[in-house]
Image (spheres, grey):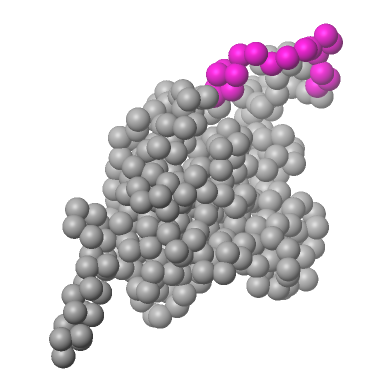
Amino acid sequence: MRILLFLSLWLTLILYIPGGESVLPLVINTWAFQSATETAWKVLEQGGSSLDAVEKGCAQCEIDQCDGSVGYGGSPDEMGETTLDAMIMDGNTMNVGAVADLRRIKNAIGVARAVLDYSKHTFLVGESASLFAESMGFLHEDLTTVKSRSIYLNWLNQNCQPNYWRNVVPDASKSCGPYKPVKGFKEWKNLHTENKVNLHSHDTIGMIAVDEAGNVATGTSTNGATHKIPGRVGDSPIAGAGSYADSTTGGAAATGNGDLMMRFLPSYQAVEYMRLGMEPSKACEKTISRIQKHFPAFFGAVICANNSGSYGAACSKAPGFTQFHFTVLKKGISRPQNEVVNCI
Ligand code: SD4
């Protein structure tokens, strides 16, 4: 009897950490993408795995075209095409499936899951990823919509502004390509001007699900950056950058300027900070400030959750971006909760 009492006290203690938001299960995702949160939650409620929850949750965003920056019909590249990046990670097995520059297939995270389930690889890209998807039964569809076409045509009409070129002729800040390298170019010095991206050309779903037993899975899905150079892959499909899961510790996911953020593997970094015993919000903050040492006003945010259900988020203050919204659904509340954090 005494042993039973002791065990139940101990379980209560590990499932509830005073001061932290800590009751499992938990779903947390970037931005105010609430229907994705709800979809993931339903999977957990019905006894599904955290991996399934993340897949279905992010897939919901692909269907809803969350903010136009997830799924089909958003972020047309320089040729007007929408291409998708996604990944999913199982924090129990450390298995990852990822796709990037995926064309003509809407359900990018589904394809990432198929890479995880049906291949020994981790990451497939481009046309070959689409062929893989088709062979796995995914539908081949045009990802262009009236909206993405009009974003593209407007961009062409505005001399292809903004774009992601530098040190080229003709001057990319005034004209469309094709471009050639500028003659005599030696070294790129002014790193900080790299931050001049269009903030609202970015938004990604990054999700962490932790089931009742503390199993962690993470995933991301995005159509990347508007007007990207064809072939560009962002941080979202890269394990450790877009998201990272380790059930012995927790999970993290990132959103923002992926061209910069991927260099710092922020999701891996955040999980490692939590492994060292840091609370999730502190781990997120430390991760953001590490990047800020090099890019003081980069646009980006990270969400973090540990395997007992404490969670947090942090963002980097950039022009026009002072607060970051994320969504949480956890045991004890019935609807997804929008939470906000002030950027540092
Ligand atoms: C990318 N990180 O492709 C993604 C975009 C994003 O919030 O997250 N935007 O760079």
Which part of the image, by quadrant, shows the N terminus?
bottom left
| Magenta range | 179-196
Residue 281, x across and y down, in percent:
33, 45
Q: Is residue 162 magenta?
A: no
On screen, residue 132 versus residue 213, left or right, reads right
On screen, residue 235 versus residue 119, left or right, reads left
- Above or below, comparing residue 7 to residue 203 in the picture: below
Residue 112 in view here = no
Name the residue: 23% across, 73% down. Answer: 10
Residue 229, x across and y down, in percent:
72, 34
Residue closer to the observer: 175 or 204: 204
Task: Considering the whole magenta stretch, tell me its main secondary structure.
Answer: loop
Name the residue: 39% across, 80% down. Answer: 46
Residue 58, x across and y down, in percent:
50, 60
Residue closer to the observer: 21 or 152: 21
User: Total number of numbered labels?
Assistant: 0
Residue 3, x across and y down, in percent:
20, 85
Residue closer to the observer: 342 or 73: 342
Using the rendered view, name the quadrant where residue 81 is placed: top right
- Above or below, comparing residue 62 to residue 312 in the picture: below
Name the residue: 24% across, 54% down. Answer: 20
Q: Is residue 185 magenta?
A: yes
Which part of the image, by quadrant, shows the C terminus?
top left
On screen, residue 238 versus residue 342, left or right, reads right
Name the residue: 63% across, 42% down. Answer: 234
